[in-house]
Image (cartoon, rainbow, N blue to C red):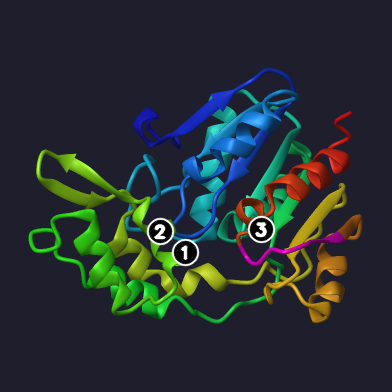
Amino acid sequence: MSNNQILHATIKGVGNPLLILHGYFGMSDNWKSLGNLFSKDFQVHLIDQRNHGRSFHEDAFNYEVLVEDLYQYIQEYRLEKVHIIGHSMGGKTAMLFAVRYPNLVSQLIIVDISPRTYQPHHNAILAGLNSIDFSIQNTRSLVDDKLAEFIPEIGVRQFLLKNVYWKEKGQLAYRFYLESLTNNNSEIGEALPPFTVFENETLFLKGDTSNYITEDEAPIIAAHFPNSKIVEIQNAGHWLHAENPKQFYTVACAFLKVS
């Protein structure tokens, strides 16, 4: 892998490495505020996964390549015994990385996702994103108006609009590689391979109004992560780190043994 294919990241602080992986359609900037807090105790790496944020674009997109991207990143920066926080898609990447390279991982925090299979459920979002013609929807408000035809939830649209930027004067574009995300959408819900185990401490955080981790997931989580626990974050859904960052940070620090 050439140097221009090392994942883009923002690195803050000193200490043991804490790698943070965003979710589908997200980017490292989503974690900037919490990253600043964690950087008081760790060297924080806010990472853009491939086809997202400012990282490289490739047609291939599945958890195997996301894990190898992360491995190359860790080798590039000569990191050892990393702590990883992964949200949703980033949590799936983190889980597979941990069972593949357990000697490189100290602790895991998996945010509102479990090892099981999830059926594809981003069709409306992908339809909305693909409906945009930036020569017609040439302002952020026009993009939002068009997306609203497919995505009624304003919070979801605001999250997606963070990926719209001025590529050049008068020309908007997406930061993510929409074609690859569309073609490989079915990969996002893939389960952790059977009989894979990570023995080190793992914390699963779930939003109290989210249905991504239910009681049904507890046995499969325990099978793959025998040294794990599940903690519920109050007044929060799937984006619990954004919806209740104070409790998220407190619980995460207690797990990471930050005083």
Residue indicated by mark 3: 240
Magenta stretch holds residue 85: no
SS for callout 1: helix
Q: Position of residue 82 (x, y in %)?
A: 72, 34
From the viewer's side, name the closer residue of 223 and 37: 37
Q: CA distance from mark 1 to mark 2?
A: 5 Å
Quadrant that contains the C terminus: top right
Give the residue drawn at x 38%, y 36%. 5
N-terminal label among 3 and 1 = 1
Image position of 159 with respect to 126: above or below: above
Q: CA distance from mark 3 to mark 2?
A: 16 Å
Rate crowding at label 3 as few (under 14), some (14 to 19) or many (20 or more) other CA atoms within 10 Å: many
Image position of 252 with respect to 141: above or below: above
Q: Position of residue 198 (x, y in %)?
A: 81, 54
Image position of 77 with respect to 119: above or below: above
Q: CA distance from mark 3 to mark 1?
A: 13 Å
From the viewer's side, name the closer residue of 108 and 198: 108
- Is 143 on the left-hand or right-hand side of 256? left
Q: Residue furthest top?
A: 14
SS for callout 2: helix
Give the residue drawn at x 13%, y 56%. 138
N-terminal label among 3 and 2 = 2
Magenta stretch holds residue 233: yes
Give the residue drawn at x 38%, y 79%. 124
Residue indicated by mark 2: 158
Rate crowding at label 2 as few (under 14), some (14 to 19) or many (20 or more) other CA atoms within 10 Å: few
Task: Count the labels in the image.
Answer: 3
Magenta residues span 230-238
Residue 104, located in which quarter of the rendered image?
top right
